[in-house]
Amino acid sequence: MVMTMTAESDKKYTKPPEEEIRSQLSEEQFYVTQCEGTERPFANEYWNEKREGIYVDVVTGEPLFSSTHKYDSGSGWPSFYQPIERDALVEDTDHKLGYARTELKSAVGHSHLGHVFEDGPEPTGLRYCINSASLRFIPKEQLEVEGYADYLALFS
């Protein structure tokens, strides 16, 4: 189920100034989100997270992924077969490794998230391979308190 925005969840997400981003993020989070870095596999916060909830952009709070679309890809990074909303992500071509890859950024914050590959499970066949450092996890039990109550529908 891909969500569509409703009045309650139609928040205005904005990208803070660089100084504010730098002061609110760890060095690794800043490197990954703002400098298009990559964290180490199997040594990151969410690669093995099993709780129900959503993952938002660590910079802006934009909702990006749901645990209902997460799966164990064996890659060592959190992997999803689809985003919460189709327009939550912006794709770009990355040639940093000498070949073309599809880089993912958050739509509003332009935070580097990771890459998408065509080797994922059904129903999409896609693997959104995401850096934990670019995400903040909000457990299902905290969605309402944190202002994401509309996303509780993903878990019913």
Image: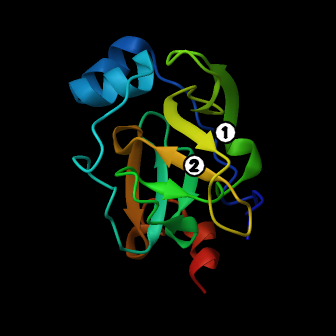
Which amino acid type corresponds to the residue marked 2 in the rendered image? Tyr
Residue at horizontal 56 percent and vertical 44 percent from the top? 62
The percent position of residue 110, horizontal first and vertical second, equals 58, 25
According to the image, label 1 marks what residue?
Answer: 89
Q: Where 109 falls versus 19 (above or below)?
A: below
Which amino acid type corresponds to the residue marked 1 in the rendered image? Leu
The answer to the question of whether label 2 and label 1 lie on touching residues, with beta carbons closer than 8 A, is yes
Q: Where 143 falls versus 103 (above or below)?
A: below
> What SS does tag 2 mark?
strand
Quarter of image, res 68? bottom right
Q: Can residue 109 be spotted in the picture? A: yes
Left or right? Give the position of 8 relative to 14.
right
The percent position of residue 27, horizontal first and vertical second, equals 22, 24
The percent position of residue 51, horizontal first and vertical second, equals 36, 74
According to the image, label 2 marks what residue?
Answer: 128
Residue at horizontal 44 percent and vertical 33 percent from the top? 59
Sequence-wise, the earlier of marks 2 and 1 is 1
Q: How is the image coloured?
A: rainbow
> What SS does tag 1 mark?
strand
- Quarter of the image where the C terminus is located: bottom right
Q: Can residue 25 be spotted in the picture? A: no
Q: Nearer the viewer, residue 62 or 83?
A: 83
Query: Outermost residue, front direction?
Result: 98
Q: Nearer the viewer, residue 96 or 20?
A: 96
Q: Where 92 falls versus 11 (above or below)?
A: above
- Mark in the foreground, 2 or 1: 2
